[in-house]
Amino acid sequence: MAAHLIRRRVLGLIAAVGLAACAATPAPVLEPGADAVSRLFLVRHGEKGTGSDPALTEAGLARAAALAALLETQGVTEVWATRTRRAEQTAAPTAAGAGLVIQAYDAATLPAFASWLLDTPGVKLVVGHSNTTDALAALLGADPGPAIDDAAEFDRLYVIDIGAEGIVRSRIERYGAPSALPEGGE
């Protein structure tokens, strides 16, 4: 099993380097690869209030609605979120639009969850946090990009295609209202 995961990560890195080397213009946000058997959309929850388990703010609710609108024609088969109000509220409009139930995952077991995502075909939305979404992308063999700005970045969307041969192709897109990134941020 470990050799299988290492092979996938190496192939993912080779694919990422190859894509970066020959990238002329970015592909449209939702155009899948021809051989994709899985497509994963990874996002951090939307803008949140304060407290130990805060709900989304109005801006966060608007972002969740924008995500649902973006994904409504993508044939989402599963919606995953951590057991937090902000993640579940971000996932809810997409799940409702697709007639799906939000499934919970434990951010403390990201390597096992990543392995399962790699081995299970489908079109999935995974809603996480600033300290888990880029880590999950990396575990899947995608380019995680720079660390997510915890204070201000809520619009990052990872689009990850996994081909029949296990080759991972990924890109980072933006959705909804632009986040107010600090000067010099992505």
Image: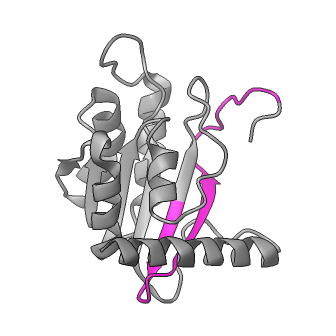
Q: Any magenta on residue 69?
A: no
Count of numbered circles in the view: 0
Return the x and y of residue 93 as percentages of the image width and height: 32, 45
User: For this view, does 75 lie left or right of residue 27?
Assistant: left
Q: Which residue is at the front of the view, 162 or 55? A: 162
Please give the name of the residue rendered at 44% of the width and 89% of the height, measured from the top-left corner: 165
Q: Is residue 118 above or below residue 67?
A: below
- Above-or-below relation of 82 to 124: above
Nearest the camera: 46 or 149?
149
Image quadrant occupied by the N terminus: bottom left
Q: Position of residue 116 (x, y in %)?
A: 27, 65
Identify the image quadrant of the C terminus.
top right
Q: Write the start and end of the magenta stretch as one range.
A: 159-183
Q: In this view, which residue lies farthest toward the front?
A: 3
- Residue shown at 62%/78% (left/top)? 15
Task: Check the image and name the residue furthest to the top.
Answer: 51
- On the question of residue 71 being in view, the answer is yes
Q: Quadrant of residue 91?
A: top left
- Residue 111's x, y, as percent? 34, 55
Rendered residue at 66%/38% (across/down): 178
Comparing 116 with 128, the one in front is 116
Q: Is residue 76 visible?
A: no
